[in-house]
Image: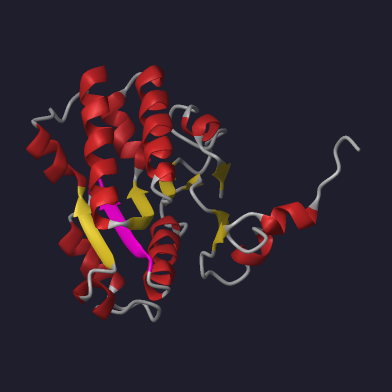
């Protein structure tokens, strides 16, 4: 019947539990594995905390997890997450949870910090995807996709970046969260309105 929802089919999909109380029940057990999800909200709404908890839960379940910081230094981020009850530094010592500064990848690839060309977008996608593959990453958070979009600028390049990166990571079995920053009065879920159209889902 048109418009019907098969809950048994939803439960049959392999899912990636977030480990967050209440959220997994809403998502029928978690995020579908290999999906790219946009987590959106204004400043101070807990987007980064959600992302970190998602990664920590995966690391505790022996899934290699990676946090890609676009603007905040990973050392500063580390200081901010140490107090969380759910966080354990042992996960980082064992290599199950890794923090990466995206600007370092920019530098290694020789990318400018102003605007990327289409070729540079492909270089960035390949670099991040290869890093995830080499490290066997099954969960990734990019904080924030909004900051990456500032370098991409055009809707076409944003669309290509998210689509190509999501496809590449999914092929390695990686479930990805893209954090989107919006103003409290925003009438859409992302800076350009493109991100939510390409993502597999929105939280």
Q: Say left or right for 151 vs 107.
A: right
Q: Say left or right for 197 vs 102.
A: right
Residue 192 sits above or below residue 95 on the image: above
Instruction: Measuring from the top left, give residue 167's x and y in whole percent.
Output: 43, 36
Instruction: Tell me which corner region of the image, top left, top right, bottom left or bottom right, holds residue 95.
Output: bottom left
Quadrant holding the N terminus: top right
Label total for image:
0
Residue lying furthest right: 1
Instruction: Measuring from the top left, give residue 191's x and y in whole percent.
Output: 43, 32
From the viewer's side, name the closer residue of 48 and 15: 15
Magenta: main secondary structure equals strand
Q: How was the colour assigned to the protein in this rendering? A: secondary structure
At 53% from the left and 69% from the top, the residue drawn is: 20
Instruction: Measuring from the top left, give residue 4's x and y in whole percent.
Output: 86, 43
From the viewer's side, name the closer residue of 112 and 63: 63
Residue 50 sits above or below residue 32 on the image: below
Instruction: Tell me which corner region of the image, top left, top right, bottom left or bottom right, holds residue 12.
Output: bottom right
Q: Which segment did they paint magenta? A: 63-71
At 21% from the left and 39% from the top, the residue drawn is: 127
Instruction: Measuring from the top left, give residue 194's x and y in whole percent.
Output: 48, 27
At 74% from the left and 52% from the top, the residue drawn is: 9
From the viewer's side, name the closer residue of 58 and 155: 58
Is residue 69 within the magenta segment?
yes
Residue 92 sits above or below residue 107 on the image: below
Whether residue 117 is visible: no
Whether residue 76 is visible: yes
Is residue 86 within the magenta segment?
no
At 33% from the left and 56% from the top, the residue drawn is: 137
From the viewer's side, name the closer residue of 183 and 25: 25
């Amino acid at each position: 019947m048109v418009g019907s929802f098969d809950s048994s089919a939803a439960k049959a999909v392999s899912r990636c539990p977030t480990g967050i109380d209440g959220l997994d029940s809403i998502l029928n057990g978690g995020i579908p594995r290999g999906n790219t999800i946009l987590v959106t909200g204004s400043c101070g709404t807990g987007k980064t905390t959600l992302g970190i908890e998602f990664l920590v839960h995966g690391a505790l379940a022996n899934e290699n997890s990676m946090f890609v910081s676009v603007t905040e230094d990973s050392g500063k981020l580390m200081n901010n997450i140490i107090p969380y009850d759910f966080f354990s530094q042992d996960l980082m010592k064992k290599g199950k949870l890794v923090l990466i500064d995206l600007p370092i990848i920019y530098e290694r690839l020789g990318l400018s910090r102003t605007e990327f060309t289409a070729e540079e977008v492909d270089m960035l996608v390949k670099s991040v995807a290869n890093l995830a593959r080499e490290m066997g990453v099954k969960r990734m958070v990019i904080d924030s996709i909004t900051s990456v979009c500032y370098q991409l600028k055009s809707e076409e390049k944003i669309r290509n970046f998210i689509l190509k990166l999501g496809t590449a990571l999914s092929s390695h079995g990686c479930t990805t969260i893209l954090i989107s920053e919006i103003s409290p009065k925003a009438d859409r879920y992302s800076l350009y309105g493109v991100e939510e159209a390409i993502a597999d889902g929105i939280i």
